[in-house]
């Protein structure tokens, strides 16, 4: 998931910003949440990052639930944790579009 085009800012919160993205290779839309990490990560913060990654891995296993946004994975890049997740507009896309993440 490195070849995507970031477009609209969907929202901001205490933990970061959420953007709508498009992968032109598979013509698919998804969302990313960018969480800034401090330059000097304390041991406690490092444990929190590990816990968050573990939580996302649990969410990834909850496939095809119509009330839970699907999480696809996470990566850390240039001082940011990037969380890849389902993009849900006013009209929910067919789940068949998300088979490339399996």
Image (tube, rainbow, N blue to C red):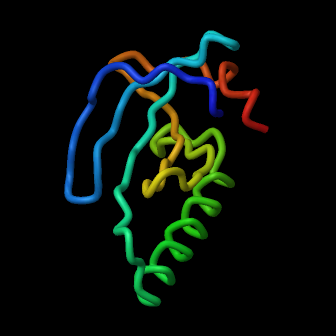
Toward the right, the furthest residue is 102
For residue 48, above or below residue 28: below
Residue at 39% over, 47% down:
34
Q: Classify 33 as above or below 93.
A: below
Q: Residue at x 27, y 28 (%)?
A: 9
The quadrant where residue 42 appears: bottom left
Quarter of image, res 1: top right
Q: Position of residue 16 (x, y in %)?
A: 29, 51
Picture coordinates of residue 32, whole percent (x, y): 45, 38
Left or right: 93 as drawn, with respect to 24? left
Q: Position of residue 28 (x, y in %)?
A: 59, 16
Where in the figure is residue 62, as x and y percent of width and height?
A: 63, 52
Count how many numbered circles sit on residues in the image: 0
Is residue 17 shown above or below 57? above
Q: Residue at x 53, y 51 (%)?
A: 77
Is 35 positioned to the left or the right of 84 in the image? Answer: left
In the rendered structure, the answer to whether residue 42 lies left or right of residue 66 reads left
């Amino acid at each position: 998931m490195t070849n995507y085009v970031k477009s609209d800012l969907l929202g901001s919160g205490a933990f970061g910003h959420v953007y709508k993205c498009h992968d032109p290779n598979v013509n698919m839309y998804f969302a990313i949440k960018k969480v800034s990490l401090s330059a000097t990560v304390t041991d406690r913060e490092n444990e929190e990052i590990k816990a968050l990654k573990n939580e996302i891995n649990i969410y990834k296993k909850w496939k095809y639930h119509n009330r839970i946004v699907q999480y696809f994975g996470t990566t850390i890049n240039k001082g940011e944790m990037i969380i890849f997740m389902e993009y849900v507009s006013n009209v929910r896309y067919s789940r068949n579009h998300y088979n490339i993440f399996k």
